[in-house]
Amino acid sequence: MGLEIQGHYNVSSLNNKTQIHRNINIPYFTASQSKDTFEISSPQNYATETYIKKAIANNSKIKNITKNFNPELKLNLSEMHNLLNGHAKDTQKIAKGIIENLPFSLKYKTNEKAIDDAAYLHDLGKILIPGNILNKTGKLNENETDIMHKHSEIGYELLKNSNLDKKTLNLIRNHHQNIKKSGYPFVSNDFRADLDLQILTMADKYSALTEQRTYKKAYTPLQALTIIYTDVKEGKLHPFVFKALYNYVKNIENIKNTTLQSA
């Protein structure tokens, strides 16, 4: 394919000796299962002004996190609308494409529901980030960068008392983290950037890079892949996940075989 990834990566739970298991137990639906479970847990239920205001009222930690940059807890509703109808849906689509292009031995290990829900809600915390920072045309200064980095933790706090499962919540909180723990927010030594998180992280980054925003132009698919490939070479993301992204993008963008080099 022309895709060259050199070196051995012994990271997370992924390795070249992963076995394929064909005998997978599939649970049956039972009469006791609530028919409205999907409706209750649908991520769209949590991306509303009513839910967010209630979540803020019931969680004092949110006010503490935002006290230095949004003490009045003003909601950036227009930003939330744009994110949910643009970047969030795009991230969902890309994450699904990555999963579909994984080897079977990895694909069946993914939690597709958690990834899909987290992809839709991962940037919900930006509703409390001031618009002058979110849409600044120039480079963010150190203080503004620190504020921007709060969005993933805010999103987690907004949603932690919802019906979302713990896996989805942790994906939302840590979608800017990586294998080397060099992202944000802070994580403990036992943190592990598992397969699901790497899929979400890669989908989010590819979507963001290929979007035009007030502070940057849209990168081409090949430019975006090259930038993400740098993260792979630095050991922040696993090459198996990157190859799945590469194959997905190659199929939809008609990218010719090429050797990616670090940006």
Image (tube, rainbow, N blue to C red):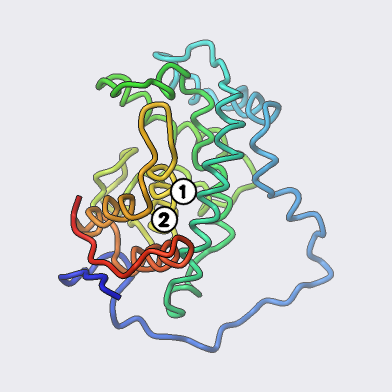
The secondary structure type at the circle numbered 1 is helix
Compared to 234, does 182 lie above or below? Answer: above
Number of other residues with Cα within 10 Å of mark 1, as a class: few under 14, some 14 to 19, many 20 or more? some
Q: Total marks drawn? A: 2
Q: Position of residue 24 (x, y in %)?
A: 56, 83
Task: Give coordinates of residue 235: x percent, y percent.
Answer: 21, 58
Residue 48's x, y, as percent? 68, 32
Secondary structure found at label 2:
helix
Looking at the image, which residue is at 61% across and 31% down?
A: 81
Q: Residue furthest bottom?
A: 23
Distance (Cα) linking label 1 and label 2: 9 Å
Residue drawn 69% across the image and 48% down it: 42
Precedes in sequence: disc 1 or disc 2: 1
Residue with the most extreme top position: 72
Q: Amino acid at mark 1?
A: Asn
- Residue positioned 26% across, 65% down in the render: 11
User: Which residue bears the numbered disc 1?
Assistant: 170
Nearest the eye: 220 or 184:
220
| 254 relative to 73 in the view: left or right | left
Q: Where does the image place residue 253, in percent across and percent down from the top left?
A: 45, 60
The quarter holding residue 255 reads bottom left
User: On the picture, is 213 further left or further right than 82?
Assistant: left
The local crowd at label 2, few if under 14, some if 14 to 19, many if 20 or more residues have their Cα within 10 Å, is many
* Front-most of residues 225 and 15: 225
Q: Amino acid at mark 2?
A: Leu
Judging by the rendered image, the residue that carries numbered circle 2 is: 197
Quarter holding the N terminus is: bottom left
Front residue (pair 222, 31): 222
Residues tagged 1 and 2 counted as in contact (Cβ below 8 A)? yes
- Relative side of 228 to 102, left or right: left
Q: Nearer the viewer, mark 1 or mark 2?
A: 2
